[in-house]
Image: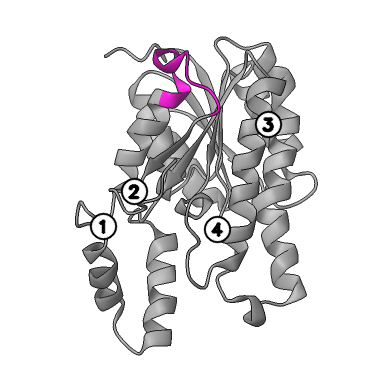
Amino acid sequence: MDLGLNGRRALVGGGGSGIGNGIATALAAEGARVALIGRTRERIEGEASRLGGFGVVADLATPDGADAAVAAAIAAMGGLDLLVVNTGGPAAGTFDALSEADWDNAINGTLRSVIRLLRAALPALRAGQDPSILIVLSSSVREPIPALVTSNTLRPGLAGLVKSLQTEIAPVRINGLAPGRIATDRIAFLDGKRAEAAGVTREEIARRTQANIPLGRYGDPSEIGRVGAFLLSPAASYVTGAIVPVDGGMVKSLP
């Protein structure tokens, strides 16, 4: 299937690694031009070079990060058609273990950064071709994750934002992805935390988790990347307001 992405201009948050990089790679393979946002210059510029795109060094958790990132992408590509909103995961821990500073960092990095990036990008997207937004969420939008109370609180709020904006910003389309256990540095970190708490190896935690996933394994960033590219593309032109799970069947709840 031709997704119709050739020449589209895409700004991808967290594009240097993990899920963001998986989506950026799929978009570039379909002919889109990509600008990747990241905080580490060497990594983001290296991945941008690999994909024939542009590296944008910015911290979206800061008040000026989103505006700077969008301005740099527009300067490099002459406008925007697609936006991937993808931020770092919030602090792990139970409610009693988290400090006020932990909550502030989680809110800035997971909620405010998304709002700021949407506000900064929407004027350019409205002037773009077949404009589309994709927000990377988490399986926590449908089922709380133990010892990850920040995600369980903030990600469902972002799902509510997607459902609100499907009407408010139309005909700009907006959809969300709800990834489960994708083999990224973030999941390796969380598995390590759980292993430390349980007194077992990280490999044992991964084995236990995979035993509860119907497909029996963690996903690859390329697998979620292909789903993301489809949702962003004109091939999904009548899809908006959807929250699409990519979790190997891990979450059993009804939509």
Q: Position of residue 122 (x, y in %)?
A: 71, 24
Residue occupied by mark 2: 247
Residue occupied by mark 3: 164
- Viewer-proximal residue, 37 or 40? 37
Q: Which residue shows up at 36% across the image and 32% down it?
A: 227
Q: CA distance from mark 1 to mark 3?
A: 31 Å
Q: Which label's residue is closer to the chain start, 3 or 4?
A: 4
Q: Is residue 50 visible?
A: no
Q: Are marks 1 and 4 in contact (CB under 8 Å)?
A: no
Q: Are marks 3 and 4 in contact (CB under 8 Å)?
A: no
Quadrant into which the C terminus falls: top left
Q: Which residue shows up at 69% across the image and 71% down it?
A: 102
Queried whether the magenta region covers residue 116, the answer comes back as no
Q: Which label's residue is closer to the chain start, 1 or 3?
A: 3
Say which quarter of the image contains residue 28.
top left
Quadrant into which the N terminus falls: top left
Q: Which label's residue is closer to the chain start, 2 or 3?
A: 3
Q: Report the magenta residues as a range.
A: 231-241
Residue occupied by mark 4: 89
| Foreground label between 2 and 4 | 2
Q: Which label's residue is closer to the chain start, 1 or 2?
A: 1
Q: Which label's residue is closer to the chain start, 1 or 4?
A: 4
Q: Position of residue 38 (x, y in %)?
A: 57, 47
| 55 lies above or below 71 | below
| Foreground label between 1 and 4 | 1
